[in-house]
Image: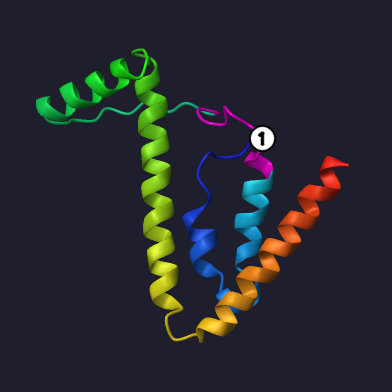
Amino acid sequence: TGPACPSRERLMEQSVLSDYISPVRQKFKRLSGRTEFFMSEAIRWTITVSRETDLSLRSFLGAHGMKKGDLSKFVEKAVCWKILDQTAQEIKARNRDIPPEDLESIIDQAVRETRAEMHKSMQ
C-alpha cells in the first residue's frame, strides 16, 4: 500500500491543463472500496495540545464509540484532510485565470473517464 495522503508535491507540480486530475483519480481508484488504508507504516509522533483540546477530542471519540487507539487514526485522517484542503485551495488560486468553461470541461472529462474505468472494473 502507498501513503494514506496524496503526495502534495505531486498534486502541486501538475498543471490543470496537463491533466493534473489523473494522479488524484489514480489515488481515488486505489483507495475506493477500502475502509482501512491508514497506518500502513506507523511513525511515532509526540505532539502537544491544550488540555481543552485533549478533553474535547477524547469526549468526541468516546461519544462516537471510539477507543484510545482510535486517536491516531483520527489525527491521521484530520491531517490528510487538512493537507488536501490546503492543496486544493492553492491549486484553485493558481488556476483562477483559466476560463471557467475550460475548467468545467477538464473536470467533466476526468469524471467521465473515472466512471468508465470504475464501471469496467466492476464487470
Q: Position of residue 120 (x, y in %)?
A: 85, 49
Residue 112 vs residue 29, the one in the foreground: 112
Q: Which residues are magenta?
A: 30-40
> Of 6 and 29, which appears nearest the observer?
29
Residue drawn at the location 43% of the way across and 43% of the way down: 80
Q: Is residue 26 above or below residue 80?
A: below
In this rendering, the answer to whether 119 lies above or below 23 is above
Callout 1: helix, strand or loop?
loop
Q: Is residue 3 above or below residue 92?
A: above
The quarter of the rendered structure image containing the N terminus is top right
Q: Nearer the viewer, residue 72 or 92?
A: 92
At a point 61% along the width and 64% down the height, the residue shown is 21
| Image coords of residue 118 (percent x, y) | 77, 49
Question: Which residue position is annotated with label 1?
Answer: 33
Amino acid at the residue labelled 1:
Gly
Residue drawn at (56%, 77%) of the image: 103
Q: Position of residue 30 (x, y in %)?
A: 68, 42
How many C-alpha atoms fall within 10 Å of the one at disc 1: few (<14), some, or many (≥20)?
Answer: few
Instruction: Say whether residue 120 is magenta.
Output: no
The image quarter containing residue 96 is: bottom left
